Amino acid sequence: MTFIHQQSAHCESGVMSSLLTNAGFPISEPMVFGLSSALAFAYLPIVKLNGMPLIAYRMPPKHIINTLNKRLGLNIQSQRFSQVKAGQQALDQALAKQQAVGLQTSVFWLPYFPAEMRFHFNAHNLLVYGKEHNNYLISDPVFEDVVQCDVVALNKARFAKGALAPKGLMYTLGNTPAEPNWPVLIRQSIKATSRILDGLPLPWIGVRGIFHLAKKIEQLDPSAIKYNRLYLTHIVRMQEEIGTGGAGFRFMYASFLQEAADKLNEAMLHDAANKMTLIGDGWRGFASLLVQYCKAKQATPDFAQLAAALRQLAQQERELMQQLAAWSKTPVKA
Amino acid sequence: MKLDDVPQHDSSSYGGHKKLLYVTNSNGRYTGSQSSGWDTEAFATALAVEALEQQAAAAYNQWQQGHLSPLPYLMYQARLDETGLSQISGFWRWRIRRHFKPTHYRRLSLRILQRYSDALAVPLAQLQAYQLPVSSQE
């Protein structure tokens, strides 16, 4: 099978973009990300990562695949397995039929990941496009080039245990979509994003979640210096290191808005793309601010200043989402 | 972010790889660009790794002094905490905490050690060797 690898910023949107492009339906990663309404914000204190709350800047794993499947009518065939052997057999059979196969895996067991990047995250996505001897040929969307992985290691990664256990999940494309109705689809997906970010009555999700995080920063105990440093850098890590990062997702969404603006010839969307770029820059600036703060080791910490910077970002996102929501309700031009 | 502003700080946590970022070129058009790392991010990573290493070092000392079994040290080495180890191994946390005691650890069966071996990616023989008193391990 000839398979063209492309590097992506995020694994799930990358896998879908690559899968569709190779099946003859060229679609960029930002377009996948935008059409599946994957942009979000969530502050989840119940889910702990090394004792710190989970902060997410996008929708949970599987959201992109499921939503795109629905919106583009991809008829994705997915399977989970209780037995490792059955999982490997199904993968080998699909490859024998010249199909590219998407897999959910753990990062920790993949030997081609550098040791520094391996951690226990079970919702990584990658594509297998062939098998040579005892090695699977893999297009891992976050890598520059194609990689290989031996059978034993891949089985281990597919059947890793723990939170979000993949249980051998594999998926293949059923349909290649016909030319979709872009004006309708783009409006629908933007409307959904505006609802997620600024329309849910939950204090931890969307713009309200950003305000919530600002409040948490303000409430930090100034005497707990070590904890504060870890907490603030944890925000940076959740934002930048884990996956694509908060700013990275904002930039990707801005890229989607720009592509949508070109497709529909909508000046308003160009304007929204520029605003989203500024918001992404704002998130990066916020990360720098947090790290500067931790480096400075100030005697009198000024958490109010950090919280104010975050509230400003929340306000900007809210205004942009209101603007986009209003646009998404405009009728499609004939 | 603009194309010219893409940081290239060669972060060690990237392991020599490059990440893709979406940035704008001089005409304001979006394009993909590779970044080898960003100092801000690297600082946060380094701090987290440092915290983990401190925990691992403390656990190592306590193991060597005979206060703890090797499991806490190996757990931190595998970048896990008790919750994570519990999820991956399938043991309840109270059992894991019992296994952290040296006397309990020495009496663990092969089957239980095998589960730790799978969860922590440590060879079974190594876990068995740790069951012997520290003085006879040489």
Image: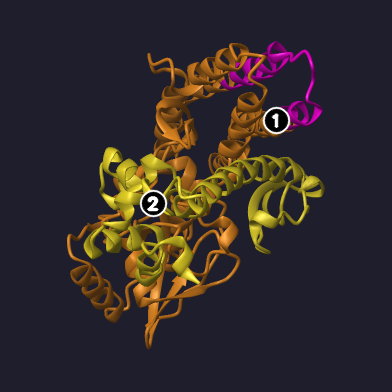
Chain colours: A orange, B yellow
Inspect the image, locate mark 2, and give the three-letter code of the amino acid beneath it.
Answer: Asn
Q: Is residue A72 visible?
A: no
Crowd around label 2: few <14 · some 14–19 · many ≥20 (10 Å): many
**Residue wearing tag 2:** A122
- Magenta part of the chain: A289-317
Give the foreground label among 2 and 1.
2
Chain of the residue under the numbered disc 1 shown in the image = A
Side of A54 relative to B91 (left or right): right
Query: Position of A136 compared to A283: left or right?
Result: left
Residue A262, percent from left and from top: 59, 43
Q: Quadrant of the N terminus of chain A?
A: bottom left
Label 2 vs 1, first from the N-terminus: 2
Q: Determine the main secondary structure of the stretch shown in magenta.
A: helix
Q: Which mark is drawn over residue A278?
A: 1
A30 up-or-down from A317: above or below: below
Where does residue A57 sit, x and y in percent of width and height? 51, 34
Question: What x and y, as percent, mark residue A160?
Answer: 33, 58
Q: Quadrant of residue B118?
A: bottom left
Left or right, residue A302 beside residue B129 = right
* Badge number at residue B133: none
Within 10 angstroms of label 1, few (less than 14), some, or many (20 or more) residues? some
Q: Is residue A12 visible?
A: yes
Q: Residue at x 36, y 72 (%)?
A: B125
Query: Residue at (37%, 88%) from the top-left corner?
Result: A133
